[in-house]
Image (cartoon, rainbow, N blue to C red):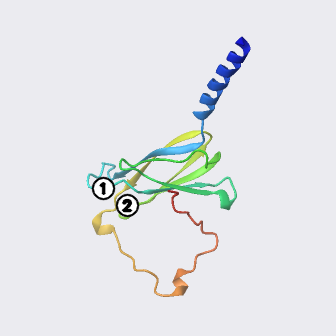
Amino acid sequence: MKSTRIFTISGIILLAALGGCATGISGTVRLVDMNNLPVTDGDAEGIVVNMINTSVPLEEASFAVKTDKNGKFNSDGAKLKNGTYKVEAGKSGFLTTTVTVEVKGGEEVNLDLKQIPKKQSRTFRSSGSDQDKIVNPGEVNIQPPAM
């Protein structure tokens, strides 16, 4: 009876310890100006954060999530494998930011998106022909976030 109790308690402790070591990426996306000061009129909710594992075959490489109203994001640890990830976030009017992180457990990543000064931003029109729409071989197809 006593040994069964010890094994049960040991098992619970082991499961709790393993649960805390789930593989995943979490963090915050901040909107800042070119001087790294917070942008007060920017909305950080709904920004797509792409996570691309450069250590696995392409079919298993990409995963994406969206930020909450505070700019926070968290991947589903069950879907990410250990490896080297390129973590990228972008928003219209801001420079895209990419960082590389080695994931061996739960990793924290903070991304600052710098606002493009109004005079330097440009608007582009869509393709004029089907020839302009051809995807270059080797481009990574980022999947939309799972909802």
Q: Which kind of residue does numbered mark 2 sit on?
A: Phe
> 128 or 78: which is nearer to us?
78
For the point 53% across and 86% down, the residue is 130
Mark 1: few, some, or many residues within 10 Å (few <14, many ≥20)?
few
Q: Nearer the viewer, mark 1 or mark 2?
A: 1
Q: Is residue 59 left or right of residue 87?
A: right
Q: Which residue is mark 2?
A: 94
Tell me the CA gap for discs 1 and 2. 10 Å
116 in relation to 21, above or below:
below
Q: Residue lying farthest top?
A: 2
Percent across and percent down for residue 41 are 26, 55
129 in relation to 17, above or below:
below
For the point 34% across and 49% down, the residue is 36
Percent across and percent down for residue 86 are 56, 53
Give whichever of discs 1 and 2 has the lower sequence position: 1
| Dots 1, 2 in contact, CB < 8 A | yes
Q: Is residue 19 left or right of residue 57?
A: left
Q: Is residue 96 left or right of residue 6?
A: left
